[in-house]
Amino acid sequence: MDLEVRLPTPARVAALVAMVEAGGYVEAIEAFYAEDATAQENLGRILRGRTALVENERAALTRNNIVARKGSIALVDGDQVAIRWVFEMTDDAGTTRVLDEIAWQRWDGDRIVEERFYYDPSQMR
């Protein structure tokens, strides 16, 4: 049996980065994640399904004003993609925190099927 591995193109990954850097967080999930995608922060719970990922992102946006810094770095190797994101997150009290994280992704063609974020949790205090 011959299994075809479908790889993301650098242009597709660049389009994801551009959408996120423009503030289209929910739109990026809808456009770039598979219907059954999973996401996990560090060793936390695994979210399953694009609908759950969208709901989680919308909830985060109600708690914070989130701005992605420009200049994210994306590395593509086969179906594996690593992106360094830096976000400024300001809560209702006006406290701003900077989240510097790595997103490790597995793609199937033009969609993310698995994602795990790695960051120092002390950034969130």
Image (cartoon, rainbow, N blue to C red):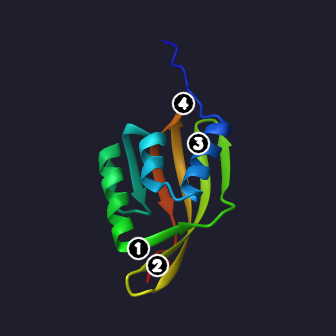
Instruction: Say the numbered circle drawn on residue 80.
Output: 3
Q: CA distance from mark 3 to mark 4?
A: 11 Å
Q: CA distance from mark 4 to mark 2?
A: 34 Å
Few, some or many C-alpha atoms within 10 Å of disc 2 (few <14, some 14-19, many ≥20)? Answer: some
Q: Residue 99 at what x, y percent from top left?
A: 53, 72
* Residue occupied by mark 1: 64
Q: Residue at x 37, y 66 (%)?
A: 60
Q: Nearer the viewer, mark 3 or mark 1?
A: 1
Q: Tag 1, which secondary structure?
A: strand
The earlier-in-sequence mark between 1 and 2 is 1
The earlier-in-sequence mark between 4 and 2 is 2
Residue 100's place in the image compared with 49, above or below, is below
* Residue occupied by mark 2: 90
Mark 1 and 2 residues: CB-CB less than 8 Å, in contact?
Answer: yes
Type of amino acid under label 4? Gly
Mark 1 and 4 residues: CB-CB less than 8 Å, in contact?
Answer: no
Q: Residue 65 at what x, y percent from top left?
A: 45, 72
